[in-house]
Amino acid sequence: MTPRRVFALPRQQSLFLPAVINPFVQEVKLAKCVFRGIFLVPIRAIFLTLVLMVTWPVAVVTTFMHPLKGAVAPMTGWRRFMCRRVMAFLGRSYYFFMGFRVVVKGQQVSSAEAPILAVAPHSTFFDGIVCIVAGLPSTVSRTENLATPIFGRFVRCLQPVLVSRQDPDSRKNTIMEIDSRAKSGGLWPQILVFPEGTCTNRSCLITFKQGAFVPGVPVQPVVMRYPNRLDTVTWTWQGFSSKTLLLLTLSQLYTNVEIEFLPPVTPTEEEKKRPVLFARTVRNVMAQALGVPVTDHTYEDCRLMISAGELTLPMEAGLVEFTKISQKLDLKWDNVKKELEGFAAVACSCKGGRITIQEFASFLKLPISPALQELFALFDRDGDGTIDFREYVIGVTILCRPANTEEVLRTAFQLFDTDEDQRITHEEFSSMLRSALGVCDLNVSKLFKEIDTDSQRLSEFQAFALNHPEYAKLFTTYLELQRYQALQGVESELSSTNHVCSEDNQEESISDKKDD
């Protein structure tokens, strides 16, 4: 039996595909929404307007002459009563007239017991209802939200921790403010955080950002569910706009939402030192309560989705589980974005944003051969006959880049330079590739010109290989394949020799018996 070839680099289980490929897509089937909306939307709009007309002046009075920056102190006295009682009641009324039926499970603890509330999954702008149910705790909000007409005043009532995109120190200042409030001993209200940082379709929990877990204080997980037959609330990167979802939701007779307060989670000493571990622990607790898997997608994956769309690729082609890929392969977002552009150069002509072996060969300007098939198989991690962007990034980084060492490139150059004059001619280049790929009639003029138009010396060859790492791996794959086939030949010869020896021994044994 012919032994199977063993890959030089085994597949790492930690880089396998996630349980949920795309948590940022949502599809809604429009059935009876339009018909019901003709009657429900106008009525609800009237009631919502009346609630807003009452809520806005209450918010203005509550926040009048109360600073948001500088020496900020938590609201006390009548302001606190107005915020936690009156504003909370008006907020519940607002959601009631939108058709929301709220079910609360579990028990919310005090700020002294758990200064931070971590809410997930975050799937819609309607998730703000958890702030109403939790008694209007503080939130983390962009500074720009304060300038929003009407709703900007409501945000002020929450005394948010402000984040500014213009301030380069904003992230550090935000974490310091969260840490200060969380360690106030119950003086400040609880801080409510959506640690995922972006909206998903609730099919999984993506990576939690570490900001809420840096203080190292107990965190109370809060999970949200929308158990409705028709999902009109989920607001993702691939789906309906916010205005459309609002109209669809107002067109429903009612919308169910469940908010469950889980027992607080206290960090261990190790988790206090490493917030990323604490974030994972809390996420796992919430995922178990929800019965969903976890993935390492992040907001950066959403940015890659947008970039993929701009490169005329399907948006989901940009999803790679950025956190996992960046940590395992030591890549920054800009590096992955650059690889996406390289992938688009190969895959833009194919359907579905996946590369077949024909397109792979066309991109390399080489025919399909055993060596090329071997290289393609190294990229194709799931063996489906195509290469997606995730497989491309992994392949280029852990398969091709290591092949681009100075020693490997110098060896490859020497293979081409048969007359040892320190330059590669078109004839030498063609002859070597014909031999390596096992193709008699091979036109490599276009590929030869890409390396350099004048003198193909070692420096030009190295520069080309650094920008096209697939070729360096192609040559090492060819050499590995040759060695593998040679070993098979040796094993075959040994097997034949052993077979002959066995026959000789058998004949000797038979003759001995006859002699006996």
Image (cartoon, grey):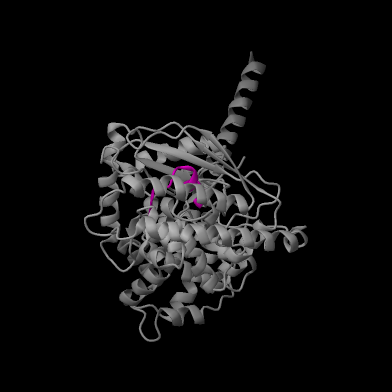
In the image, is 270 to the left or to the right of 509?
Answer: left
Residue located at (35% from left, 54% from top): 160
Question: Against 474, is 494 above or below?
Answer: above
Residue located at (43% from left, 47% from top): 136
Outermost residue on the left side: it is 71
* Front position in the image: 497 or 383: 383
Q: Pinpoint residue 127: horizontal percent, then vertical percent.
A: 52, 51
Q: Pinpoint residue 254: horizontal percent, then vertical percent.
A: 68, 49
Q: Pinpoint residue 374: horizontal percent, then vertical percent.
A: 54, 57
The picture quadrant where one finds residue 39 is bottom right
Does residue 296 show up? no
Residue located at (41% from left, 52% from top): 323
* Front position in the image: 508 or 124: 124
In the image, is 469 to the left or to the right of 497?
Answer: left
In the image, is 282 to the left or to the right of 501?
Answer: left
* Front position in the image: 280 or 214: 214
Q: Which residues are magenta?
A: 128-140
Outermost residue on the bottom side: it is 454
